[in-house]
Image: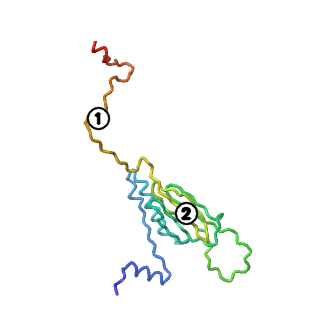
């Protein structure tokens, strides 16, 4: 039998006693004198905040292609009108609000969690939410990474030939600018005569 990691034992012990292990760090002093690290500070703050949030509703993230992903959330009891998806500052915010219950009679046991929630997911640059649908109590959000053409790697063909073919030809006349004289150029036909 292999010994468990100390952190795992601590988490298990706290779970058995019904306790919670949460840690929070204030990174503000690190960024007081830093310039240009706003995005890093925001990511660290979001990560610290999301670590302390509860795990409801549960979700899966699956890679469905080279550049596409699916986020699936178990949201039994919610309808499409109860769910809101917002993308703001490279963050996908999924929130659900509880609608008024229909006449269900006297509830003897409520095992289906129907409470309001908000989950935040950090999105990388150039990642877009392309769609969302609900089926059988599961919300499926499609996400795709769309890299702009300017940022994609491009191949440059290697040509064979003289170096003069590859170098750009110099212009024979300079553009006119106020206060400057144009250089005198002689047309080739006049120079031969």
Give the mark nearest the N terminus, 1 or 2: 2
Residue at image point 48% right, 60% down: 68
Give the structural element (helix, strand or loop) at label 1: helix
Measured as percent of width and height from the top left, residue 71 is found at 52, 65
Q: Which mark is residue 165?
A: 1
Q: Residues within 10 Å of mark 1 (few under 14, many from 20)?
A: few
Q: Nearer the viewer, mark 1 or mark 2?
A: 1
Q: Please tell me whether mark 2 sits on a helix, a strand or a loop.
A: strand
Q: Residue at x 49, y 58 (%)?
A: 144
Asked if residue 75 is positioned above or below residue 189 in the image, the reply reads: below
Residue 177, given in percent of the width and then of the height, sits at 38, 22
- Residue 108: horizontal and vertical position, in percent? 68, 83
The quarter of the picture where the N terminus appears is bottom left
**Residue sitting at x 45%, y 55%:** 125
* Screen quadrant of the C terminus: top left
Mark-to-mark CA distance, 1 and 2: 52 Å
Is mark 1 in CB contact (under 8 Å) with mark 2? Answer: no
From the viewer's side, name the closer residue of 152 and 21.
Answer: 152
Q: In the picture shown, does residue 86 fall above or below 108? A: above
Q: Which residue is mark 2?
A: 141
Residue 5 is left or right of residue 105, and the answer is left
């Amino acid at each position: 039998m292999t010994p468990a990691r100390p952190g795992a034992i601590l988490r298990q012990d706290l779970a058995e006693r019904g306790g919670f292990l949460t840690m929070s760090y204030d990174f503000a002093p690190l960024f007081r004198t830093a310039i240009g690290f706003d995005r890093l500070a925001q990511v660290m703050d979001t990560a610290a905040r999301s670590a302390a949030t509860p795990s409801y509703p549960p979700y899966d993230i699956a890679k469905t292609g080279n550049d596409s992903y699916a986020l699936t959330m178990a949201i039994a009891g919610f309808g499409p009108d109860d769910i809101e998806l917002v993308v703001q500052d490279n963050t996908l915010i999924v929130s659900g609000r509880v609608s008024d219950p229909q006449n269900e009679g006297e509830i003897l046991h409520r095992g289906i969690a129907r409470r309001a929630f908000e989950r935040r997911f950090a999105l990388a640059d150039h990642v877009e939410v392309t769609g969302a649908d609900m089926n059988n109590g599961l919300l499926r959000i499609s996400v795709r990474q769309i890299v702009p053409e300017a940022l994609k790697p491009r191949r440059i063909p290697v040509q064979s030939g003289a170096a003069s073919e590859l170098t750009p030809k110099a212009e024979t006349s300079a553009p006119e600018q106020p206060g400057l004289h144009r250089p005198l150029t002689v047309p080739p036909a006049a120079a031969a005569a």
